[in-house]
Image (spheres, rainbow, N blue to C red):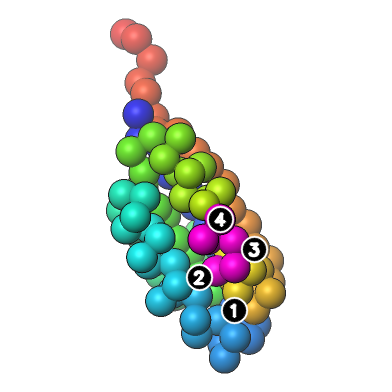
Amino acid sequence: MSAYIIVSYDIRDPEAFKDYVPGVLPLLEKHGAEILVADFDVKSLEGEKRGVHVVLRFESEEAALAWYNDPAYKPVREIRLTSCANNNSVLARGFVPPNA
């Protein structure tokens, strides 16, 4: 079953953040991720709007966690964590309709 990592954050230091996207893209490809959403200007319907919203689809929860826990991602993740505020990341499993 597909799994999704959903991330939102506010970029506070654009100069420090500039290396994040070039660093993360090869790792996403390595782990078979599909970028479904990467939006820097969403329309907020409820709650606080963040500067960046990203939705990644992985083949499985195991694949998503393999990407997130990949030792090569740790220094890249640190770029995002130190250059951004209000970081929020969640892992969600794909929807399975209840039996009718």
First of labels 1, 4 by sequence position: 1
Q: Which residue is mark 4?
A: 71
> In the image, 96: left or right of 90?
left
The circle drawn on residue 11 is 1
Residue at x 48% of width, y 64% of height: 53
- Comparing 80 with 53, the one in front is 80
Do tag 1 and tag 2 residues touch (Cβ < 8 Å)?
yes
Q: Which residues are magenta?
A: 71-76
Mark 1–mark 3 Cα distance, whole angstroms, equals 9 Å
Residue in the image at 64% along x and 63% along y: 87
- Residue 46 percent coordinates (x, y): 57, 57
Q: Secondary structure at mark 2?
A: strand
Tell me the crowding category of disc 2: few under 14, some 14 to 19, or many 20 or more residues within 10 angstroms, Cα based: some
Q: Residue under circle 2?
A: 52
Q: Measured along the vertical axis of the image, is residue 12 above or below residue 21?
A: below
Q: Could you say whether the residue bearing mark 4 is in a helix, strand or loop?
A: loop
Q: Above or below — where is 98 with respect to 31?
A: above
Q: Amino acid at mark 4?
A: Pro
Comes first in the chain, label 3 or label 4: 4
Q: Which of the image's four quarters has the C terminus?
A: top left
Classify the position of the N terminus by image quarter.
Answer: top left
Magenta residue check for 81: no
Q: Classify mark 3: helix, strand or loop.
A: strand
**Callout in the foreground (1, 4):** 4
Q: Amino acid at mark 2?
A: Val
